[in-house]
Amino acid sequence: MKYKRVLLKLSGEALMGSQNYGIDPKRLKEYANEIKDVVSQGLQLAIVIGGGNIFRGVSGAATGMDRVQADHMGMLATVINSLALQSALENEGIFTRCMSAIEMNKIAEPFIRRRAIRHLEKGRVVIFAGGTGNPYFTTDTAATLRAIEIDAEAILKGTRVDGIYSADPEKDANAKKFDALSFKEVYEKGLNVMDMTAFTLSHENNLPIIVFDMNKPGNLRKVIFGENIGTIVKN
């Protein structure tokens, strides 16, 4: 394997599958199988998942809801998704731990950095829920922060698109796919990879970001073994 320890960032929308909202059990099982494949190879894997399939804080604030309240609701949505993914992984025989930035001891462990690293060293998949625990920060930022804290070698951003393009490939047939980019090039081209806080944090800490299509079977394994799929952003 090219990597020993990585953080996988998934969007909440990815769990919808073909549905308009909520969680698709079929998609959960597909992801669990992909994750099982790489963990069985000895990969130390942490996961952060968004909550956009249930509630998005920014959207709530746009309708007049208090932004802090809306973001707290979004954080709880990430906990729901994390528990769903944990259940799917455990159904495949994978040992997991769910650690929440918001303390809720009945259903998840509190996030403690050294404990999280120890779980990874023991071969457990660690799911970080609750974002950063603070409003005004996205799960992209939470993923980057946790990746840095656990000394991950890369952030793998699993999406429904097979990399970073010069424009939205679903809207522009002439959009060009990039195989590799520097952080500087992403800034200069104004490309949308992660929110700016998360992206800057990755840049400053020399943490590569790999954007790839998580919905294509076998792609996660290919990334772990260093195959040239998706787009890598690095210094």
Image: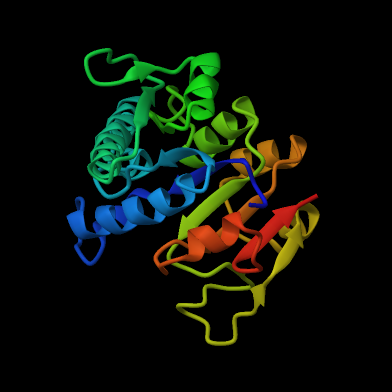
Question: Which of the 4 image quadrants contains residue 107?
Answer: top left
Q: Residue at x 19, y 54 (%)?
A: 25
* Residue 15 image position (x, y, % from top left): 29, 54
Which corner quadrant of the image does residue 16 belong to?
bottom left
Residue 35: image location, x then y, percent:
41, 50
Q: Is residue 15 above or below residue 179?
A: above
Taking depth in this image into account, of 12 and 123 the one nearest to the observer is 123
Q: Residue furthest front?
A: 41
In depth, the one of 178 and 152 nearer the eye is 152
Quick check: 73 left or right of 173?
left
Question: Where 116 falls versus 194 (above or below)?
Answer: above
User: Which residue sits at x=74%, y=35%?
Assistant: 205
Residue 13 appears in the figure: no
Can you give x and y, in whole percent of width and height, for residue 115 in the image?
49, 16
Q: Viewed as shown, does residue 147 lie left or right of 186?
A: left
Write the residue at 50% across / 45% down: 8
Q: Position of residue 4 (x, y in %)?
A: 62, 41
Residue drawn at (25%, 44%) of the image: 88
Nearer to us in this view, 44 or 55 = 44
- Quarter of the image for residue 226 reads bottom right
Asked if 234 appears above or below 75 in the picture, the reply is below
Q: How many marks?
A: 0
**Lateral position of residue 12 relative to residue 18, left or right:** right
User: Is residue 38 at least partly visible in the picture?
Assistant: yes
